[in-house]
């Protein structure tokens, strides 16, 4: 990043600083970031669990078309 001669964006500059160990947060900001990440991970896991349940489709019925759909989808 930044070696191509193109201007570096603010976020790219922050990423470069972090990679070099030059990015520092005050303790309160670090705790807030950690908490936000933990909450985001929890929400992602909840969405994954809901998606898993939604992936298990059943109840196609006894009609030939329902049986054909079930056979092709499973």
Image (spheres, helix red, strand yellow):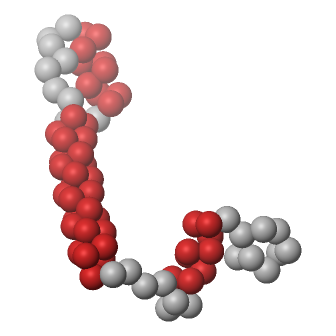
**Residue displayed at 33% across by 81% down:** 26
**Residue displayed at 62% across by 66% down:** 10
**Residue displayed at 48% across by 84% down:** 23
To which quarter of the image does residue 55 belong?
A: top left
Q: Quadrant of the C terminus?
A: top left
User: Compared with residue 12, is residue 55 higher up or lower down, i.e. above or below?
Assistant: above
Residue, far top: 63
Q: Position of residue 17 (x, y in %)?
A: 56, 83
Count of numbered circles in the view: 0
User: Compared with residue 23, is residue 55 higher up or lower down, i.e. above or below?
Assistant: above
Q: Is residue 34 visible?
A: no
Q: Is residue 8 left or right of residue 58?
A: right
Q: Position of residue 36 (x, y in %)?
A: 26, 62
To which quarter of the image does residue 57 belong?
A: top left
Q: Is residue 24 visible?
A: yes
Q: Position of residue 64 (x, y in %)?
A: 25, 10
Q: Quadrant of the N terminus?
A: bottom right
Closer-to-camera residue (16/62): 16
**Residue displayed at 83% across by 75% down:** 4
Closer-to-camera residue (8/39): 8
Residue, far bottom: 21
Closer-to-camera residue (58/22): 22
Closer-to-camera residue (56/18): 18
User: Compared with residue 22, is residue 2 higher up or lower down, i.e. above or below?
Assistant: above
Q: Position of residue 40 (x, y in %)?
A: 27, 57
């Amino acid at each position: 990043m930044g070696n191509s001669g193109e201007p570096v964006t603010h976020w790219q500059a922050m990423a470069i600083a972090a990679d070099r160990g030059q990015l520092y947060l005050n303790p309160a900001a670090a705790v807030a970031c950690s908490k936000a990440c933990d909450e985001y991970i929890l929400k992602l896991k909840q969405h994954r669990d809901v998606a898993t349940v939604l992936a298990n489709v059943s109840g196609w019925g006894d009609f030939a078309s329902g049986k054909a759909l079930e056979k092709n989808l499973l």
